[in-house]
Each structure stands twice: as structure tokens, then as C-alpha cells.
Image: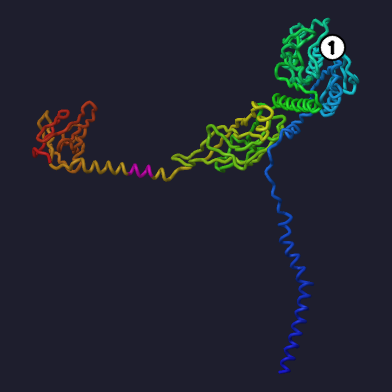
Amino acid sequence: MQLRVRIYDRRERQSQRLGRHTRAWFSRRVRPFLTVMAMSAVGPLLVIAPPTVADNPAPTVDQIYQALHVDDVPAAYVILVDTSSSMMGDGMYPQVKRYVQRFEKAISPQDSVTYYTFDSSVSGPYASARNLPQAAAGTATDFGPAFAYALSDLSAAADRGVRVGGLFLLSDGLLDAPRTDTKYLTLHSGGWSELRRTAAILEERMALEGYGLARQGKSSASQTGRRCGGIPTTDPSTCAGVQEVLTSVLGPNVIVLNDTSSGQISSLLNQAKANERQAKAIHRLLTADEHRGVSATVSAVSGENMAALDLGQGSAPVVVRITSHIPYFTDIEVTKLAARKVGGFPVKLVGLPVTVRLGPGQTRALPAHLQWAIPRASGLIAGRTILTGHLSVTGQVSSSWVPVIKANLLPAFTLGGLTGARANYGGSYVRTIDVMQWAMIGGAVLGALLLCFLTYLFAVPRLRGDLVLLNLADDHEVPLTVHGHRRWRGDLDDVMGSPGSILVRGARRGGARISLRREMAVATRSGRGRLTRDGILVLASLAFRHRTGELP
């Protein structure tokens, strides 16, 4: 018992030592190996597996502006600042100077800004807002001459190719021209009519926007009892504020804010900047991209002629070239590319991508295969068949920009489609003999011949008996034995002494009859006839009758 206990204890200690050694060996040798194997199996899944990428969102207006390089399109701005003394009363003039300086820094480097100040006279031009007068101390508000300078500068910019412009009128007062300035005294004066004509001509060459800033309560002349120059009036032609002056020259589509707070000034300038960028984008799209589209051509690869294809091959390599004729769109997509054929044999284009993306003016050469299937390559007669036609490429053109443009820039904008140039194609193939067709035709002919034979066999009666041939000239009789279908045919030289022959055959026409024909050596002495029962038939001085007097 004790021995067994010792043996058990010894074995247990050995087992424990072996377990420790095994675990140590496993930790030192096997575990690192398994770790490396696991990492080699799982690692690529962790490293190579691409992260899930969400679909690209639709572009924003700002992104389209950046892609269009809107800031590279120049614009011309003219800012008219009222420097009458009333502009200092509520601090409007210092605020205007501060915010136009910010506006000047925010516009594109390609843009130009010109400043004019006006009261009883016009000062300027100033190249920067920092050069404006320190204070406003004028005695009148003469809008007309300032407008003349502004339109002159904008017209000069249009002559330089600038197509976007903005005219700002910043004033707290009403039209108050000196009495000596009869040209611009009221909106009915001749000077204002001339300004309106100049603006109309300018707007045909430039996208011109009007912006105004006025003091609350002085932007309209519709208030009853308002005094202008000491005279009560509600006529906007004699008592006109910023709104009336701008709309008189530029039309009703102007933006005027009747608040001189800093927030309103900033809002007006920011709105003007946004509108001018929008006008740049619209101008660029209108003049370059509207109704433009994509063209497509298909041609054989170098060294091959698509007008001489080997139709037995079933396909041929081709190159489809897609070209964008849209100068500024960077997001053009062409889908559903296919071949449209006229004449020839059915063809299709395979191997083209589902979507082709093009940049401005970009051309992409797409390798593809032209496939076809000839419906029949055999016929009754062997030979070579030539098939010709022409094909063009069709597809759909789209862009994610268009919804944004329609909603934010130009609702009437239309993108052009895909125009496929016509390409001639053709080929020839060897037409072999169709054995089955010939077998069917041969069977039909043999069947027809068999039908004719059976008809002849059963329709023409077999005749029996003798015919008597009587020469009417000398009453000489000669018996003719008839049998079968063709009873007798022979030379008459030994019978009647008359050259020629006689043909006798049976016929079924209303009963059993015999059809006779005598052919003489001389063509003028011949004839045919039918011998009925108990009848006599005379053919060229020969009479035929039955010996027995009856026909079978």
C-alpha cells in the first residue's frame, strides 16, 4: 500500500515536472510560431481591407466656383460715397469707409475697385478706400455727375473685356443738386436720360448689378408732405433717394438697404460679393458651356480598315474616342455607350466602361470590340457576300453640377448631349452550299416526278384491239395492232407507200378514247385527232377505224 503511494506520488511529481517543461516549451517555441501564423493570416485582412467610403456628396456652389476658377474672372466695381456733411451726423461715413476697406480686401485679385466721392461736386477717382477723405463736409447731394463718372469707368472696363460689374451708391440723402446743375437737377433732366441710355448700352456688354445703402426714412420720396429744397412734394423725380436714383438708371433689379448699422453695411457688401461671384459663374457658363456637349467617334485600331472586316471572325478591336467640348465643367459623366447602325449588319460595342468621366476639353481613347453575328453563312449557291453600312456611338451626358446650377445659378441652363460621328463599316464572308436546302429541293423534284408518273400510269388507259388504217385514195386497208399505252409507232413507207409515221396512245376524256397523230415527212401533211367509239377519223387522206368496232 505504501509502495503504491510512493509510486503514485513519484508519477505525479514526474507528471507535474513534465507539464511545467511542456508549458515552458510551448510558451518558448510554439506560441510565438502560432502568433506569427495568426498575424500573417489576419494581418492582411486588417491592413489591406479598405475602409468603407461613403458616396461622394453633391458639390456645393462654392466648390463649383472653385472648379470654375471664378476668382480668375475679372470684375469691375465702382463705389460712389456721399461726402455731404449729413453723413457724419450718425457716423455713417466712418462706418462706410471701414467696411469698404474690408470689401476691398475680400474681392479677387483680378477685380478692380474705383472710388468716387460726391457732394456738390465729384472727387476722385481713388484707387483704394484708404485714400478717401477723412471726413464728409459737403453741402449738397448731386448724384448725377457721380453716376456719369461711374458709367464711364465701367464702359472702359467693358472695352477691356471685363464682363461683370457692380455699381455702389452709398448715401444718406435725397437728390439735392445745386441749382446751377440743370443737367441733373431732377430725374426728368436731360442728363439723367443720357445716363439711362448709357446704362442700357453698357448692360448689353456687361452683367451690371446695382447696390445701394441709405438711411432709414430717406430711401423713398413717397411720404406725403416731404420737403425737398423747401418745396413740399411726393414726386420722385424731384425728391429721389438712393432707391429711386438707382432704379431710374439701372432698372428695378437693384439691392438697397435702408439701414446704416454696421451689420447692414456688412450684409450689403457680402451680398454684393456673392452676387458678383454668381454673375461671374453665370457669365462663364453662358458664354462657354451652355448647350455644349460631348462627341464620340469609333474607328479601327491602327493598321486596320473598318470598311473591310473579316465577318467570319465575329468581332474586331476598335477604339472609341470620347471628347468633351465643355471648357469649364470638370464633372462630366458619359454613360450607356452603345453603337447605332444604319444598314449593314447588326453590331454592338462591348468592353466599354459603365461610366466615362471627362474634364474640360478632355479626350479619352477607350479600347473596345465591335461584335456582330451574320444570320446566314450558307445558301443554294456558293460565293462571297459583301455587307456595308455605317454606325455611330450613342450615350447620355450628365453632371452633378447641373442640379446645383439650375437651383442656384441659372435655372435655364442646359447641358449638351453626345454627338456620334458616322463611321462606315462593312465586310464580306464566304457563303457555302446549304446541303439541307438542296436535299429538300431534290426531294421535292423527285416527288413531283413520281406524282407525274403515277398520274400518267393511272390516268391513261391501257388499250386493246386493232385499228384499221384505210387509204381513201385506193381503199387499201392495213391493220394496226395496238397494245399498252403507246400502241403503235412505225414507218408507213412499207404500209402505204407514203413517208411518215403514226402515233397512237390512249387518253381519258369523257370515256375511253384513242388519240392519233400522223406525222408526214412533208410538214404540210400532218394532223391529229381523237377516235371515239364506233367512229372514223380521217387524217391527211388516211382513215382510221376499229376492226372490232368498239373501244375498251
Q: Quadrant of residue 410?
A: top right
- Any magenta on residue 508? no
Q: Which residues are magenta?
A: 440-446
What percent of the width, then of the height, locates residue 501? 21, 34
The quarter of the picture where the C terminus appears is: top left
What percent of the width, then of the height, locates residue 217? 76, 18
Q: Quadrant of residue 100?
A: top right
What percent of the width, then of the height, locates residue 27? 78, 72
Residue at left 15%, top 39%?
480
What percent of the width, then of the height, locates residue 176? 80, 10
Q: Nearer the viewer, residue 60 or 266?
A: 266
> Horizontally, is 4 left or right of 540 in the view?
right
At mark 1, the secondary structure is: loop
The quarter of the picture where the N terminus appears is: bottom right
Q: Quadrant of residue 354?
A: top right
The answer to whether any part of residue 533 appears in the image is yes
Q: Label 1 sits on what residue type?
A: Ala
- Which residue is the extreme one toward the front? 225
Q: Nearer the viewer, residue 431 or 409?
A: 409
Secondary structure mostly taken by the magenta-highlighted segment of the chain: helix
> Horizontally, is 176 left or right of 403 in the view?
right
Q: Residues within 10 Å of mark 1 (few under 14, many from 20)?
A: many
> Horizontally, is 373 left or right of 239 in the view?
left
Residue marked by disc 1: 140
- Any magenta on residue 442? yes
